Amino acid sequence: MSEVLALAGELIARPSVTPEDAGCQALLAARLGRAGFRCEQLRFGEVDNLWATHGEGGPVLVLLGHTDVVPPGPREAWASDPFVPEIRDGVLYGRGAADMKGSVAAFVVALERFVAAHPAHPGTVALLLTSDEEGDAIDGVRRVAEEFRRRGQGIDWCITGEPSSTARLGDLLRVGRRGSLTAALTVRGVQGHVAYPEKARNPVHQALPALAELAARRWDEGYETFPPTSLQISNVGAGAGASNVIPGELRVGFNLRYNPHWDAPRLESEIEAMLARHGLDFELRWHRSGEPFFTPEGPLRAAARAVLANVAGEPPEESTGGGTSDARFIAPLGAQCIEVGPVNASIHKVDEHVSVADLEALPEVYLALMERLLMG
């Protein structure tokens, strides 16, 4: 069994459902310590974060990942125990195999190989791991980035191991992500009998024109490789439990995925002003998950394009699609960020898996990126 496959199996066997780390980072820190890395545990609240570095000064190249996983769901729905790694027909099964314990294992093996081959390499190579990526993402990389900002820790390049490939390893290179902004809207009315609407104020009726305007608005035409900004209403609730009662309150949840034309404060201001124009008595609570980031053409994209073309046989699609990742907290430190990882078809699903061949190729992908960027 290859060392990356064995290490991935060791990680999968630890049931690190967010925010638990279940000993994953201690295992990796001990291993990297033996390879000459300086390892620092950064624990905030219930979240474990590992910062492991080798070398001095710049440029600083960070491999970014997470050891936590989403819950497996009903275990009887799995063909095998989600926390017992199992190989069937050339495929490794287990929760986190693709998202993202496979990549984390590949990171560690690649880092070991890199410092063994280049013990006096220029700059700094580093691994940053958190156990809070799949959860609230408050005390994970978000908090670590705040600590880095306080210390003056710079980062030039960041490679996130999120499962970015679509059909085969290396067919897609993520060069940015949209921002994410979530709103909880409450529209207040006056409860009453449906037969006497003049004695009530129906918040559903009042809010419908505003919600229709929100849903229909074309926010922009896109940005570089980013799609247009999108607003999606995800939850609507009202009612007193009876069909003859006008509700006194309407609750609406919606989310915006937005490109660099916007930032969260501007979007919040636009939407609040629009709701006010409709004369609504409302309250809005916002959650800013992260601003968009975009890595323009430069050494990082060029290196990744060349390496992935060798793996996939043709240049990768360069995309900014998908959800969010922890790179959204690293990019504001001035880092250029990309995402390179295995096929994402099974992530968060029952019987999550990764191809053994892809997993065994990943360390060489990350090693080639490090050597192109730091060794010339």
Image (cartoon, grey):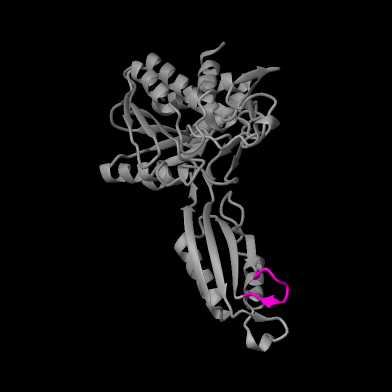
Q: Nearer the viewer, residue 180 or 157?
A: 180
> What percent of the width, then of the height, locates residue 228?
61, 57
Residue at horizontal 64 percent and vertical 74 percent from the top:
247
16 left or right of 34 in image = right
Q: Nearer the viewer, residue 329 or 41?
A: 41
Q: Is residue 210 above or below residue 128?
A: below
Residue at horizontal 47 percent and vertical 65 percent from the top:
266
Residue at horizontal 50 percent and vertical 31 percent from the top:
16
Q: Quadrant of residue 149?
A: top left
> What percent of the width, then of the height, locates residue 95?
59, 30
Asked whether residue 364 appears in the rendered view, the answer is no
Does residue 246 belong to the magenta stretch? yes
The range drawn in magenta is: 239-247
Residue at horizontal 34 percent and vertical 33 percent from the top:
59
Classify the position of the N terminus by image quarter: top right
Q: Is residue 213 above or below residue 24?
A: below
Q: Is residue 374 above or below residue 282?
A: above
